[in-house]
Amino acid sequence: MPKDMNKNYEIYERRESEARSYCRGFPTSFASASGSELTDDKGNTYIDFLAGCSSLNYGHNDPDMKQALIDHISNDGIAHGLDLHTDTKGDFLTTFEEKILEPRGMDHKVMFTGPTGANAVEAAMKIARKVTGRTNIIAFTNGFHGVTMGALAATGNGYHRGGAAGAALTGVTRMPFDRYMGEDCDTTKFLEAVLKDASSGVDAPAAILLETVQGEGGLNAARTEWVQKVAKLAKEHGALLIVDDIQAGCGRTGTFFSFEKMDIQPDIVTMAKSVSGFGLPLGLVLVRPEHDVMGPAEHNGTFRGNTHAFVTARVAIEKFWADDSFEKELAEKEEILTEALADLAEIVDGGKLKGRGLMRGVDVGSGELASKICGRAFEKGLIIETSGPDDEVVKVLAPLTTPKETFRKGLNIVLDAARDVTTNNTIAAE
Ligand SMILES: *Cc1c(COP(=O)(O)O)cnc(C)c1O
């Protein structure tokens, strides 16, 4: 390939669909990446606090995952095997069982869906409907579950729903998430009331679908008691509990699953994003054995399971989840993060801390300010994005493996950027 081919950014304007998104906020061309840093084609390095939207929880090009993958490819390992038995798939399942499921007392079966989060959510919704013979799924305000039609019905975001152009997004009833009506309102009371009332107009649900921390919806972290109450209501009313752990899972909240410390056992868990560890596509549905009702290929897909992702996913689990040392490290980084974000909340005057674990941010009050902060941070060498209904949350999704020094350096850039854009003379000077 001619070396300068990618330097011609006009190609994106000319040929890439307007559907492109993240690239608009970071107008350069990235050439390489290692750990928590990306380098562009001009040799500038950036600290990465976006991390593939939590698809790179272990950073870019982890050397052990990379080596295992190179070895697999050099040895003519299977690259695509439909859902045939392969040594890599068997090894992944064995490791996942030993290091993740068994220690957490989970008897769930692992169903490989198509390799995206949305596909895992589609499968989870279909399973719940098949198990219960009911159609309705209860999802929550500001939930994000993907943008294929079934998953989009469960997604709250108005912009994404607009993409359906009026085609019916059916089979989902929306309920208020925790804190949607303010700190003091227990929204499960409303949920309980409509579930108990056969004339509430809300059909008996096949499932209740939730994120414990709403990643795209503004880092709304549900309180443990709220999640427990929802889990109890699901059980009482014959609905399955689906936890969408696609973004909050794989260590992002400080434990492998986001619900681990909540003393609940979801009937179904959806996973994607960081489950491969290396940024390769892989989607999973974990389902209690009694609900494992999909017939052979009933939820079909050519790319169910991704053999290369099995290789790196196994290494990720062996490397980071074989004992509790990584979890301990995450707890330390959580403190660094919380402290810095408290400073950010002060700088922007009235900023609100959002999120949990290493999935945190600050609601700075407006999308305009949040985007200015992120824009300024980019000029200073940091990649960071916003979240929330009005993009009003500055959201830190640093790789969990980010060395403390780099982590602090990145957080200082966010703070400096916030100072710059909230100080009038800096803006006037530009
Ligand atoms: C990203 C995400 C999805 C969708 O995953 P895709 O791979 O983009 O289809 C679903 N649920 C949650 C919670 C997510 O963060």
Image (cartoon, rainbow, N blue to C red):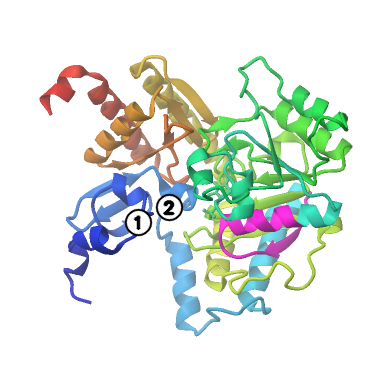
Task: Identify which amino acid the numbered label 2 is placed on.
Answer: Gly
Task: Identify which amino acid the numbered label 1 is placed on.
Answer: Ser
Please identify the residue farthest to the bottom as the structure is shown: 76
Residue 426 on image: x %, y %: 16, 23
Q: Which residues are magenta?
A: 105-126
Q: Mark number for residue 59? A: 2
Residue 93 on image: x %, y %: 68, 66
Horizontal side of residue 73 vs 211, given as left or right = left
Q: Residues within 10 Å of mark 2 (few under 14, many from 20)?
A: many
Q: Residue at x 61, y 42 (%)?
A: 255
Query: Toward the viewer: 309 or 222?
Result: 222
Horizontal side of residue 254 vs 192, given as left or right = left
Residue annotated with mark 1 = 34
Q: Residue at x 31, y 61 (%)?
A: 16
Q: Residue at x 45, y 41 (%)?
A: 397
- Image: 35 above or below 68: above
Q: Is residue 108 magenta?
A: yes
Marks 1 and 2 sit apart, C-alpha to C-alpha, by 7 Å
Please identify the residue farthest to the left as the structure is shown: 429
Judging from the image, what secondary structure is the residue with disc 2 in?
A: loop
Q: Is residue 112 visible?
A: yes
Query: Toward the viewer: 349 or 19?
Result: 19
Horizontal side of residue 312 vs 291, given as left or right = left
